[in-house]
Image (cartoon, grey):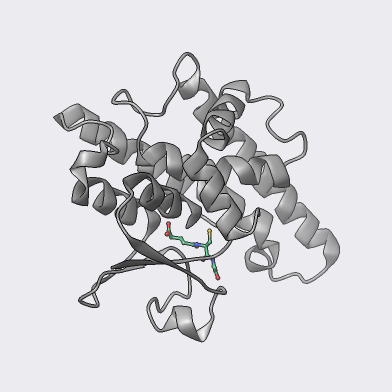
Amino acid sequence: MTTLYFAPGACSLAPHIVLEWIGAPYAAVKVGFGSPELLAVNPAGAVPTLREDDGWLLTQAGAILDYLAHKHPGAGLSGGDSLRARAEAHRWSAFLTSDLHAAFWPVFMPYRYTADPSPEARAQVLAAGQALARKQLGVLDRHLQGRDWMLDGGRSVIDAYAFPMIRWGIKMLPGGLADFPAVQALHDRMAADPAVQKVLAREGGK
Ligand SMILES: N[C@@H](CCC(=O)N[C@@H](CS)C(=O)NCC(=O)O)C(=O)O
């Protein structure tokens, strides 16, 4: 059985939702960041990590989501199979990994981005991260205007990927999503999905 190692509310929420959408049997194992159990499967001590029955391990959220979409084509979660549809999926996966997710790192862990341990220095890093996250949410908002889902091919793994980051925006940014109505609409569409609600309940509502 496929096993997903996850931490509540982290970016691992995305493959957790996708596994639920797919509907095939899977195991979800809750782990702590950097815990021995997680380090045993991912030397980076990070989630998500996916393990297949034969011991094959896959890390990196974008790679895991792409793998799941193509492992289960019948679920229709790839966003389309044309050359351009695949390029768009890669484009937005890369944006979420490298631009939006990365903008939140100084928000969650400001101490990693300054050698100055003072509260003032950390507050500066936090503010810079929040500003960058707001900029990237603006990019997402402009893309989502007039569309229900991230990709032209309908609901996909990329919507699931955006969801945890959108939730961080609500919780961690001053003003939440008030300036990003199309992002808020995607959030609400996802949050209304029974499979998403089931996974959020399993993760502890975080
Ligand atoms: N590039 C990796 C980043 C994974 C990552 O940093 N995940 C976070 C949770 S959202 C984590 O596990 N952080 C623990 C840490 O950095 O110690 C991916 O996209 O999967």
Q: Is residue 151 visible?
A: yes
**Camera-nearest residue between 2 and 132:** 2
Q: Is residue 141 left or right of 15 when viewed as pictured? A: right
Q: Is residue 128 left or right of residue 185?
A: right
Image label count: 0
Q: Quadrant of residue 60?
A: bottom left
In the image, what residue occupies the spot 72% across and 53% down?
A: 126
Residue 111 to residue 93: above or below = below
Which residue: 20% across, 28% down? 84
Could you say where residue 35 lies in the image, as x and y percent from the top left?
54, 81
Q: Is residue 27 left or right of residue 175?
A: left
Tell which residue pokes out farthest to the top in this image.
146
Residue 28: x percent and y percent? 44, 65
Please state if 23 lies on the left or on the right of 72 as rendered.
Answer: right
What percent of the width, then of the height, locates residue 75? 26, 40
Examine the rendered structure and indicate whether residue 27 appears above or below residue 176. below
Q: Which one is in front, 179 or 3?
A: 3
Q: Decide if residue 132 is in sight here.
A: no
Which image quadrant: the N terminus? Answer: bottom left
Classify the position of the C terminus by image quarter. bottom right
- Could you tell me which residue is drawn at 36 percent across and 41 percent down? 157
At 42% across and 41% down in the image, what residue appears? 95
